[in-house]
């Protein structure tokens, strides 16, 4: 059996995304710079013992493993919680704060999408994480007796009784108590419904050692409100030939041992303290700086004269002999100390990837947030700011109340459009714990006026060939406009009367600082899939059923976007395309016929037609002509009924085709 005690430290690294939003006109314009992932975590917290939902449970979450900040919420009356606006990452969750219940720990992974479909500029990811909290209403009681060599027994006073919960998600997972002078113990407040094992840890009365006793023999589950009576527990003598071993410790294979921690462990039998040796490989002060104390010759405590180094791995070697003459030598016990101070975030980063900002305000202070408390007065704490000619920039350093945020405030405003570097070292309150800082950034360029309104914007109908009007499936267009003084580029937006009620960014034309004012500029725009009228027909058809698409053009520069141009509204003005008429099924000459004759003609066009608007007739005489439409409304079969004993031929079948936007085209077929 091995019990571990860890301090769970969680932190939330809050990543901020800077977005520059242009808002100089009344239209609601959506123009994301990149795909944005917004994550959320939700779930239900229940009473693991009864299954009832728990309200008022505190849900604490944090991202990563750096101590910075945590955030929390509480479950509602239905035991439900919801956490929104999270960045991609792995989050640690702690559910607790409910009197009479355990805590529960879990994790939630908000991943990033590999592919985002066109038009989806914001991608939402939701992760579910439920939790079960156990009632602390279970328990054990009993009496511990120690078997003596002569076969008699005596009360085991001061023996440690421990209950280990099987699940590491239940917090706490280890519960213990100590027997009284009469050997009696009562271990209550245990998680009812959670399975676990009950042990009596190695015990010594000063003369005789007793081995670990697995009281229950196997994993058991307590019932709510039950304090189970175990009766008499008899401890057996440790077999003299057994070599001692470590039952538990606070350091074996641990990854976050405190630098000022004392190391403790419990052996399986009593140890001869005079023979006990300790060597910590990697601990510089040396073995003479280690002090060992004992409790009952079973549990040892190691103290050091100086702290361990941060973020360092150590090997602990233990050697000696038990009081019954069995030797031991453990030289592979590994542990690592907690990480040292590091830079967590700064306002010099543009995003969570630590990209340097290129528009830092010239009148702003620089903030550096660290994972540990900063020792501002240490000789190792020194931060300097340099300009692009390596000149030193004077300023003052201050520290936040929680000692995590170091602020450097320049004595005067920085220069616009210039490069800077902040460099130096920052010490924590721990010994020899130093973080080195080197960050570069650029200040925002000098302010400029917004560009003027774009004029002369028009649709170039000659882009494809000749004077080609917009058709139902047109998706690519060419626009022209007059250049604006001071613009470095132009953005084109579109909206329609079907799917997109707000303007959507569809094209950018950068022209740089050397554009020629008053010159004519042009750009080609291709509508994205969000403008498709039917999404499942395999073709992009933005202009069906009279849909209108409206475009505007805006000039932009470092100050933002100028006013929108006059709107350019396009709609389907093209008549339906020519038909494909199949062979006539037979002659319309019904001379001598005693019954009407039916003749069919196939009609197929590549465009969607209006059933109500399309008409069919035959010249010269009265006949019945009707259309049986196909499923796509792109044509069908014309059925012509010739009266009995009709001798007229060479008449014309006239089909007046009307598309979904009301455009008309006439097809004529000469009947034979």
Image: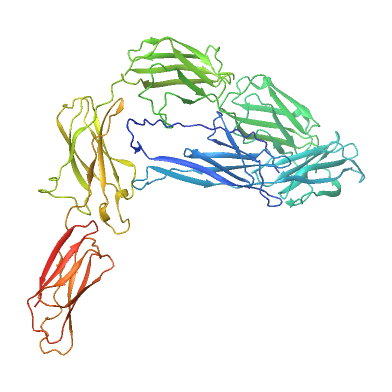
The quarter of the displayed image where residue 516 is located: top left
Q: Is residue 541 visible?
A: no
Quadrant location, the C terminus: bottom left
Q: Position of residue 392 (x, y in %)?
A: 39, 10
Quadrant location, the N terminus: top right
| Residue for point 21% across, 65% down | 614
The quarter of the displayed image where residue 447 is located: top left
How many numbered discs?
0
The quarter of the displayed image where residue 504 is located: top left
Report the front residue among 181 and 517.
517
| Residue for point 12% across, 45% down | 462
Q: Position of residue 21 (x, y in %)?
A: 36, 31
Determine whether, in the image, residue 371 is placed left or right of residue 445.
right
Determine whether, in the image, residue 633 is placed left or right of residue 235.
left
Report the front residue among 456 and 533.
456
Q: Is residue 25 visible?
A: yes
User: Relative to residue 224, is residue 89 depicted above or below?
Assistant: above
User: Relative to residue 467, is residue 332 depicted above or below?
Assistant: above
Q: Position of residue 235 (x, y in %)?
A: 84, 44
């Amino acid at each position: 059996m091995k019990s571990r005690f860890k301090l769970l430290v969680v932190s939330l690294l809050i990543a901020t995304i800077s977005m520059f939003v242009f808002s100089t006109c009344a239209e609601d314009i959506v123009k994301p710079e990149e795909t944005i992932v917004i994550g959320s975590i939700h779930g239900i917290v229940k009473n693991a013992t009864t299954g009832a939902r728990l309200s008022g449970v505190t849900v604490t979450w944090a991202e990563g493993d750096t101590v910075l900040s945590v955030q929390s919420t509480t479950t509602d009356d239905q035991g439900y919680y919801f956490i929104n606006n999270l960045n991609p990452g792995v989050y640690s969750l702690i559910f607790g704060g409910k009197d009479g219940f355990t805590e529960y720990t879990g994790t939630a992974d908000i991943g990033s999408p590999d592919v985002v479909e066109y038009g989806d500029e914001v991608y939402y990811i939701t992760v579910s994480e439920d939790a079960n909290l156990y009632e602390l209403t279970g328990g054990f009681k009993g009496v511990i007796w120690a078997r003596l060599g002569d076969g008699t027994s005596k009360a085991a006073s001061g023996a440690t009784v421990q209950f280990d919960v099987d699940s590491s998600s239940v917090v706490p997972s280890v519960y213990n108590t100590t027997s009284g002078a009469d050997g009696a113990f009562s271990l209550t407040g245990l998680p009812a419904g959670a399975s676990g094992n009950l042990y009596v840890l190695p015990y010594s009365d000063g003369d005789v050692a007793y081995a670990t006793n697995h009281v229950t023999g196997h994993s058991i589950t307590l019932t709510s409100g039950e304090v189970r009576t175990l009766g008499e527990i008899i401890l057996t003598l440790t077999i003299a030939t057994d070599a001692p071993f470590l039952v538990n410790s606070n350091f074996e294979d641990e990854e976050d041992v405190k630098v000022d921690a004392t190391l403790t462990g419990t052996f399986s039998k009593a140890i001869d303290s005079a023979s006990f040796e300790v060597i910590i490989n990697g601990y510089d002060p040396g073995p003479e700086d280690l002090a060992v104390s004992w409790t009952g010759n079973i549990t040892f405590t190691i103290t050091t004269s100086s702290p361990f180094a941060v973020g360092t791995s150590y090997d602990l070697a233990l050697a000696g002999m038990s009081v019954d003459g069995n030797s031991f030598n453990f030289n592979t016990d590994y542990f690592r100390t907690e990480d040292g101070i590091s830079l967590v975030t700064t306002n010099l980063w543009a995003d969570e990837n630590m990209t340097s900002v290129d528009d830092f305000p010239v009148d702003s202070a620089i903030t550096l947030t660290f994972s540990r408390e900063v020792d501002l007065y240490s000789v190792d704490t020194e931060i300097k700011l340099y300009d692009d000619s390596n000149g030193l920039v004077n300023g003052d350093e201050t520290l936040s109340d929680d000692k995590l945020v170091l602020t450097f405030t320049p004595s005067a405003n920085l220069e616009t459009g210039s490069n800077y570097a902040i460099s130096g070292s920052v010490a924590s309150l721990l010994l020899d714990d130093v973080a080195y800082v080197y960050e570069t950034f650029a200040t925002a360029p000098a302010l400029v006026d917004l560009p003027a309104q774009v004029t002369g914007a028009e649709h170039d109908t000659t882009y494809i060939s000749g004077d080609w009007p917009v058709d139902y499936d047109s998706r690519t267009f060419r626009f022209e406009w007059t250049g604006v003084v001071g613009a470095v580029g132009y953005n084109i937006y579109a909206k329609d009367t079907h799917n997109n009620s707000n303007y959507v960014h569809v094209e950018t034309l950068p022209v740089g600082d050397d554009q020629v004012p008053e010159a004519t500029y042009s750009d080609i725009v291709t509508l994205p899939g969000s403008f498709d009228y039917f999404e499942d027909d395999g073709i992009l058809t933005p202009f069906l059923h009279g849909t209108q698409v409206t475009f505007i053009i805006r000039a932009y520069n470092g100050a933002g976007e100028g006013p929108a141009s006059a709107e350019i509204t396009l709609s389907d003005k093209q008549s339906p395309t020519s038909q494909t008429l199949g062979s006539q099924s037979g002659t319309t000459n019904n001379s001598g016929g005693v019954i009407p004759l039916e003749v069919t003609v196939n009609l197929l066009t590549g465009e969607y037609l209006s059933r109500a608007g399309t008409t069919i007739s035959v010249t010269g005489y009265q006949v019945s002509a009707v259309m049986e439409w196909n499923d796509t409304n792109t044509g069908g079969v014309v059925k012509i009924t010739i009266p009995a004993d009709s001798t007229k031929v060479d008449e014309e079948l006239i089909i007046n085709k009307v598309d979904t936007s009301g455009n008309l085209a006439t097809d004529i077929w000469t009947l034979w």
